Amino acid sequence: MARTKDFDETEVLNKAIELFWLKGYNATSMQDLVDGLGISRSSLYDTFGDKHSLFLKALDSYQTANSAKFCELMRVDQPAKETIKRLLEFISSSLLNDISQKGCFIVNAEVEMGLHDKLVGETIQKNDQQIDEIFYTVIKKGQEKGEITNQQDARALARFLFNTVKGIQVTAKSTKDKAVFDDIINTAVLVLG
């Protein structure tokens, strides 16, 4: 007869996200996970598999949650530039409110492991494509309504904004000066025409 788990898997996974996000994959030991997650080593292996499997689940969970937030922000019925500005402000605000200045979990994983770990790279590519597509959809609608310039390709603008997001996420690791992020956001919106 299988034992019932005496812990909430989602709560444990959220703790794993925080631990990997703060320390990175390579600097997080199995003992760190056992101590930080509050479950036994055997429960960790039985539920999540090895450290790499847990990391992939944590990365996927983080990516899914963030994509949902972005989609929710983009669904608001307002002018395209306002929608984009609101999303950029949401991202910078979240980063500025992080006392630990961890940056973005996905970007951190990309820098640490993206080139050397195929499965991590695939998760990052999935995330990148989703965010690029969110921007593209809003820009395309904005162009159709005359709110955003048609002089630049919608896909190129989406990629520019996506790269701006990554820049904001990296910059947040070294500064908490809101004026820096306001300048980046205002300039990005100006590019839209």
Image: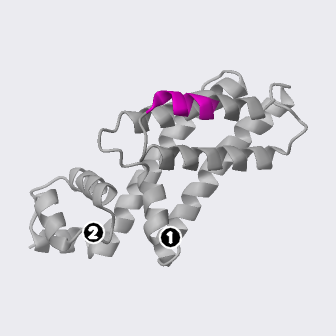
- Is residue 117 in the magenta section? no
The residue that mark 2 highlights is 27
Residue at left offset 66%, top offset 24% = 82
Q: Crowdedness of circle 2 by 10 Å Cα count: few (<14), some, many (20+)? A: few
Q: Main secondary structure of the magenta part?
A: helix
The answer to which image quadrant residue 32 occupies is bottom left
Image location of residue 125, percent across then percent down:
58, 63
109 relative position to 184: left or right: left
147 relative position to 16: left or right: right
Is the residue 148 above or below the residue 12 in the image? above
Labels 2 & 1 near each other (Cβ < 8 A): no
Figure quadrant of the C terminus:
top right
The secondary element bearing badge 1 is classed as loop
Image location of residue 8, percent across then percent down:
18, 52
Figure quadrant of the N terminus:
bottom left
Is the residue 105 above or below the residue 84 in the image? below
The residue that mark 1 highlights is 114
- Is residue 182 in the magenta section? yes
Magenta range? 177-185
**Which of the pair 93/63 is nearer the observer?**
93
Amino acid on which the number 1 mark rests in the picture: Gly
Q: Crowdedness of circle 1 by 10 Å Cα count: few (<14), some, many (20+)? A: some
Residue at left offset 46%, top offset 53% = 63
146 relative position to 94: left or right: right
Q: Is tag 2's residue or tag 1's residue first in the polypeptide sequence?
A: 2
Amino acid on which the number 2 mark rests in the picture: Ala
**Which of the pair 24/43 is nearer the observer?**
24
